[in-house]
Image (cartoon, rainbow, N blue to C red):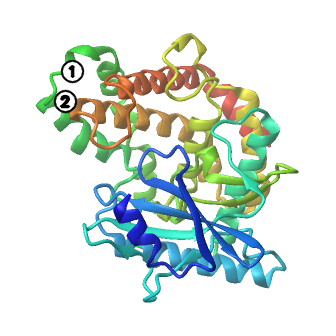
Amino acid sequence: MEELREALNNFAFDGDFVSVKEFGSGHINKTYIAKYRAGDEEVKYVVQKVNNGVFKNVDELMDNVFAVTSYLRKYIRENGGDENRETLHFIKTVDGANYYRCADGSFYRAYVFVKDSISFDYAETPELFKSSGIAFGRFQKMLGDFDADSLYETIENFHNTIWRYENEFIPSLEMDVENRAQNCQDVIEFIKSRKDKMSILVDLINENKLPLRVTHNDTKLNNVMFDEKTLECVCVIDLDTVMPGLALYDFGDAIRFGANTALDDEPDLSKVGINLEYFKAFAEGFLSECGDTLNQCEKDYLAFSAWLLTTELVMRFLTDYLNGDVYFKTNYSEHNLVRARNQMKLALSMEEHMSEMEEIIKSI
């Protein structure tokens, strides 16, 4: 906690410190809510310790974050919205820097907590999931004229599935540093047997059929803040992976996370499958905001992108399991293997229902 207190003392927060506590359920960064009192008003700030083992260049990461949020705040203001509610407001340090580096080398950044808002780890209703689709579709639309090439690639090849297969999964399998491969032959075979499909979207980029856009790249439900009374979407958060990418990545990852009939670490695979009602709800919300900006190739591969991003997560969870759980936070020794099998079952369910998913997209 000593470095956290050091960081809190070096941000340009308004008011006097009241309290701080751990917050959220993210896999990568450590997040806190810090409360301050300015006169009669209580102000909350989100303070995060950035995982610089995952994000190797914090300068580039925070340059992206400030560039995108500054653009969004201007866009929202010019279109009659509330810039302090509809996008994040990041706080600089007392020295004017985008983040604070502690004496121990750790990195912290801070932004204003979105007032009167709430987040959810899973969608209790299709209406809530549709609202998240509206949020991510609107995020895509608002950044339609932003120059994607001006952003840094904060994690190289983040959704390049074939690159992950060849450069991360196969080497991890061959090294098998924890002697765990013997425990997961079923998942290994699943991944290997689907290698040929992993390069489809990358190939379409190279053929100039899929345009690079500014994309969020981590479109989980809990990265949307909702109005605590109306449950309408307010804004998108967690902008660490905002960089050039495909709209398909954002759509596919949201479906992977939110249209699963179970949580993504549910060990009872009989509970896992694609929820077509939720799939349709999210697609309706997403396309209502950005459908007019997508080309026909993007629309044609929306359903496929859900399968691809799910299969990618099978591989990423298993790779981390083989490596000894060095990337994702885990609560027990087999946690990443449970996640990998969960996502494998989801991908198999998508394969079974792919024609129905494609028809839903066409109907919208």
Q: Position of residue 244 (x, y in %)?
A: 47, 66
**Residue found 67% across the figure and 72% down from its top:** 37
Secondary structure beneath disc 1?
Answer: helix
Spatial separation of the CA atoms under disc 1 and disc 2: 7 Å
Residue 78 location, x and y as percent? 78, 85
> Residue at 33% across / 32% down in the picture?
195
In the rendered image of this protein, does residue 141 appear above or below residue 185?
below
What numbered label is drawn on residue 217? none
Which residue lies at the image location 65% right of the left edge and 49% below the top edge? 299
In the displayed orientation, state which residue is furthest to the bottom.
95
| Quarter of the picture holding the C terminus | top right
Residue type, numbered disc 2: Leu
Residue 247: quarter of image? bottom right
**Residue 220 in the figure: left or right of residue 290:** left
Mark 1 is on which residue type? Ala
| Picture coordinates of residue 201, whole percent (x, y) | 46, 48
Circle 2 Cα neighbour tier, 10 Å, few/some/many (<14 / 14–19 / ≥20) = some
Q: Are marks 1 and 2 in contact (CB under 8 Å)?
A: yes
Residue position for label 2: 173
Say if residue 23 shows up in the picture: yes
Q: Residues within 10 Å of mark 1 (few under 14, many from 20)?
A: many
The residue singled out by tag 1 in the image is 181
Q: Mark 1 or mark 2, which has the lower sequence index? A: 2
Secondary element under disc 2, as helix, strand or loop, is: helix
Quick one: 135 or 279, which is closer to the camera?
Answer: 135
Residue 166 image offset from top left, x and y in percent: 24, 41
The image quadrant where one finds the N terminus is: bottom left
Residue furthest out toward the top: 270
